[in-house]
Amino acid sequence: MTYTLYGRPWSGSIGVEFVLEELAIPYQRVLATGYRDKVEPPSFAEINPLRQVPVLVSDDGAVMTESAAIAMLLAQRHGDARLLPEAGSAQEAEHLRWMFYLAATVYPTSMQIFHPENYTDEPDHHASIVARTWIVLNQQWQVLGEALDGGLHLVGETLTVADVYLAMFALWFEKMPEIVDHASMRQFREHHLAYDPIARVIARHQSGDWV
Ligand SMILES: N[C@@H](CCC(=O)N[C@@H](CS)C(=O)NCC(=O)O)C(=O)O
């Protein structure tokens, strides 16, 4: 099966790219821009009425949205499920918990920092929203750092899709001075962002050769 990934450089689609590359799944990228007014390509608004990326379209036409769900689906379908803990194990439950935490808690908090304009009509309020949200994000960072506890994996001793997905957030905040410096998160970031295929995806974004 091959896929089409609708995304934008450095956006939430990069976490899906990490998974696709890690599992060596063939895919093509389509740049989706102008999500507010002028959507490019125009078909993107029909594919995802929310006009958000990432969107993954399978070659049978099936549309999948929600970055964490896409990542989990790919991990289930490909690579003999090696990125997922054993079905029925305690680690499976733990893994599910972290995937939801990242998608439902850390992701929206991140968006509030990057796009305060989506949370108020008052430009004067942007700075205070962002400042308050940094406190929230840094609490979440501590929680993640404590879960890692000096290790390189959120769950168990091997790479799971939760690690690959967490690498996206580690990348987003890598160079931001406001992020709390947690030793475990720093070690996680240094290891996983330098790990090929994640490093290969990042290099492609850095080179501007996204599509
Ligand atoms: N819950 C969604 C969130 C996706 C999301 O917020 N994507 C951002 C880019 S990182 C976007 O397309 N924002 C445009 C908008 O929300 O209007 C997911 O995990 O895929």
Image (spheres, rainbow, N blue to C red):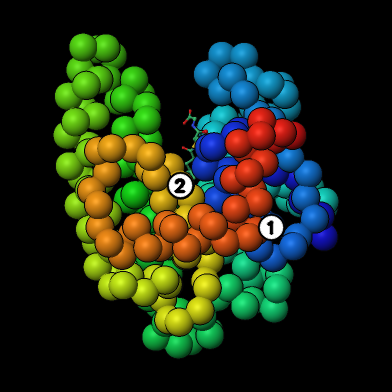
Q: Residue 1, percent across and down? A: 82, 60
Residue nearest the observer in this picture, 187 or 93: 187
Please report the residue visible at 59 percent of the width from the left and 45 percent of the height from the top. 202
Mark identifier at residue 21: 1
Above or below, 159 against 27 in this view is: below
Above or below, 14 against 210 in this view is: below
Q: Residue 162, percent across and down? A: 47, 65
Q: Quadrant of residue 156?
A: bottom left
| Horizontal side of residue 78 vs 109, given as left or right | right
Q: Which residue does the numbered mark 2 point to in the structure image?
A: 171
Q: Quadrant of the C terminus?
A: top right
Q: Dot 1: what SS?
A: helix
Is mark 1 in CB contact (under 8 Å) with mark 2? Answer: no
Residue nearest the observer in this picture, 159 or 186: 186
| Horizontal side of residue 15 vs 129, given as left or right | right
Q: Quadrant of residue 140?
A: bottom left
